[in-house]
Image: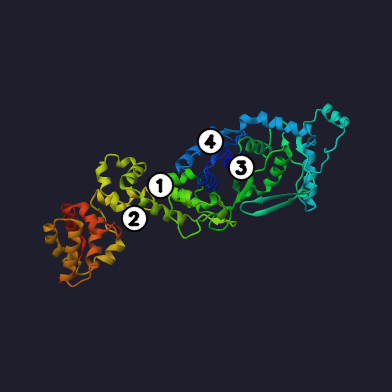
Amino acid sequence: MTQTMTVRFAPSPTGYLHVGGARTAIFNWLFARSIGGRFLLRIEDTDRQRSSDAMTREILDGLRWLGVDWDEEPVIQSERIERHHDECLRLLKEGKAYWCYCTQEELDAKRETAEAAGGAFLYDGTCRSLTEEQHATHRAEGRSRVLRFRVPEGRTVFNDIVHDETSFSNEEIDDFVILRSDGTPTYMMAVVVDDHDMGITHVLRGDDHLSNTPKQFMLYRTLGYETPQFGHLPLILGSDKKRLSKRHGATSVGEFQQRGYLPEAMFNFLALLGWSPGDDREVMSTDDLVEAFDIRRVLKKSSVFDEDKLLWMNGQHIRLLEDDDLFRRLLRHRPVELDEVPDEDFLRIVPLMKERLALLPEFFSTTEYFREDPQTYDETGIAKRWKAGTGALLSGLLPKLAASDFTAAALETLIREHAEAESVGAGKLIHPIRLALTGSTASPSLFDMMEVLGRDTCVRRIESALEHISEPDS
Ligand code: GLU
C-alpha cells in the first residue's frame, strides 16, 4: 500500500504566528494541496511554562485567516507524553539509550573548560558504559538522571529536498538527551515519535532546524521507523540581510491583518519567499499557487522580506476583488467615529478608491472630502496649481458646470473643451479643480470623483476656492 503524502505544521505556542512560521505552514499546505496529500497540525506545547492556550488560538486564527486549513483535529503534543516515554524506555531496553547521572554543575564545568580551550562542548560519554554497581551507587546517592541516546558511529546522510545530499559526521553529534530528569521527553524525541505516528512522509521546515535533522534521522532509524523526506526552507531575512526579527518591524501575521493587508496578498507574498512559479508571474491567487506549486523549485538561498513589495502586492489584490467583497472587508477597518455615515456613502466611492488603495484603512483616512467640504488647502498645491489666471479659468467654467448633466464622460468633454477654448492645457484646469474639491493634490480620477460628488457640491466648492485664489491686480 502506498502511503498518502502527509505533511504537518508544528508550531510551539510560545509566541504569536510569525511570518516565518506562516511561510512554513503555507509551503507545507501548498505541497499537500498540490498533490492531493494531507496537511496536519501539531501543537508542540511540551514547554508548559512558556506555552499558552491563548497563543494556540492566536496561531490557529492566523492560519484560518490566511486560508490555511488542516485535515484533522490538531495533535496536541503534551497529550502524548506517555507514548514518547514508552518509546524512550524501548530504546533503553534495546541498549540504544542509557541513563546519565551527570549533574548540571559537572556538565557546566566541562563546557567551560571546552570553551576556554576554544572548542565546543560535546557530552563526553561519562555515563555511556556504567556498570550495574555504578548505576546503583548513583541511585543510592539520590542523583537525578536523564536518558541519553547512544549515537552510533559513522555518518548520517540524507537527501534533502532543497539542499540535496546532506551529510554529517556522527562524531560531531554528542549523545543527546531524549528524556529529561522529570520524565518528560525532549523536543528531539517527541517530534520523531509524533511524526512517525501521524504518518508524516515529508518534513518541510525552516533552515534553522537543519542541525536537528541528523539527530532525528538517527532516532528514526534506531526506532525502526521509516524516515520521511526532509526539506529545509531558506531563512527569511530583513532588508539589512540579517535574520528577520522584530527590529525590522511587524513580524506577526496578526499585526499585518490589523494594518489592513488582505490574506490573499499575505499568502501570495509569503509563498514567493523562497519559491517561484518558474515564470514571471507575481500576483497569484491561492488557486493559481496550488496549481503552480512544485516543491523542487524551492530556492536554496535566503529571501528578503520586502515590505514595500508586500504593500504593492496588497494593492494588486485589492484591485482583483469585487466591489461588494472589498466593501465587506473594508468595514472591518471602519473607525468608530464614522459609524453614523450611511453605508451608501462609502459604497459609491469603492470603485473609485479601489484603484488607489494599498492598505484597507486608507479608504477611510484619505476620503474625508467625499463627506465634507475641505476646510484648508494643501500649501504646496496652492503654490503650484493656483496660478495667475486660474481664477478666471474656473469662473468661466462654473456656468458650464451648472448646465452639464454631470456624468464623468460629459464632465471630461466639457473641461477639456473649456481648456481648449481658453488655449491652455487641460492640466491647468484639472489640477486646480482637484485642489478646490478635495483640498489636496491627490484623488481618484477627477471626472469620476466629480460625478460622485454631484453638481451642487462641485459648484459650491469651486466657488469657495475662488475666494482663496488670488488674482494679480489688474
Ligand atoms: N515546534 C518547532 C518550532 O516551532 C517545529 C518543529 C519541527 O517542525 O520539526 O520551531
Can you tell me whether the CB of the residue at mark 1 lies under 8 Å from the nearest atom of ligand 1?
no
Q: What residue is rendered at 67% in x and 46% in y?
A: 213
Which amino acid lies under the numbered mark 4 shown in the image of this protein? Answer: Thr
As drawn, is 410 to the left or to the right of 381?
Answer: left
Left of 322 or right of it: where is 168? Answer: right
Q: Mark 4 points at which residue?
A: 56
Question: Which residue is disc 2 drawn over?
Answer: 356
Question: Does 410 appear above or below 150?
Answer: below
Using the image as rendered, state which of residue 284 and residue 226 is in the foreground.
226
Query: How far is mark 1 from mark 4, CA to CA?
Result: 23 Å
Mark 3, residue position: 201
Q: How is the image coloured?
A: rainbow
Q: Is mark 1 on a helix, strand or loop?
A: loop
- Count the marks: 4
Q: How many angstroms separate mark 3 from mark 2 (CA)?
A: 45 Å
**Quadrant of the snapshot with the N terminus:** top right
Can I make out residue 467 in this image?
Answer: no
